[in-house]
Image (spheres, rainbow, N blue to C red):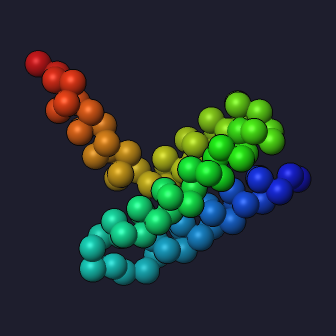
Amino acid sequence: MSTSLIMALIWLVVANVIGMFPSRDNHWRNAYMLIGVGMPIVGYVAWENGVAIGVMMLLMGAWVLRWPVYYLGLWLRRIFGRK
């Protein structure tokens, strides 16, 4: 198993453990930190293992951080206007 995949799996475990603990701001501060750490890891996974594996890791990260992805979709819909 490559180093990048081990880092990505550690990120997934840490993200799930963080999600188990209560938070006053509904985990938004943790989500920003996880996004900031996770995006370079996804890039490293794609660089080391190929684009398909990188996209799979991106989808797994989006599954863990589903609310920021949901609100990003709402924001993009509001910007580009869906009538």
Residue 67 location (% of width, % of height): 34, 52
Residue found at x 65% / y 43%? 43
In the picture, measured across the screen, residue 4 lies left or right of residue 59, that is right
Front residue of 13 and 7: 7
Front residue of 18 and 45: 45
Q: Quadrant of residue 57?
A: top right
Rendered view: 83 above or below 33? above
In the picture, measured across the screen, residue 75 lies left or right of residue 64, that is left
Residue found at x 34% / y 65%? 28
For the C terminus, the image quarter is: top left
Instruction: Single out the residue that lies furthest toward the left.
Output: 83
Rendered view: 9 above or below 70? below
In the picture, measured across the screen, residue 34 lies left or right of residue 49, that is left
- How many labels, in total? 0
Residue 61 location (% of width, % of height): 54, 50
Instruction: Single out the residue that lies furthest toward the top.
Output: 83
Residue 3 location (% of width, % of height): 83, 57
Residue found at x 44% / y 54%? 65
In the picture, measured across the screen, residue 2 lies left or right of residue 32, that is right
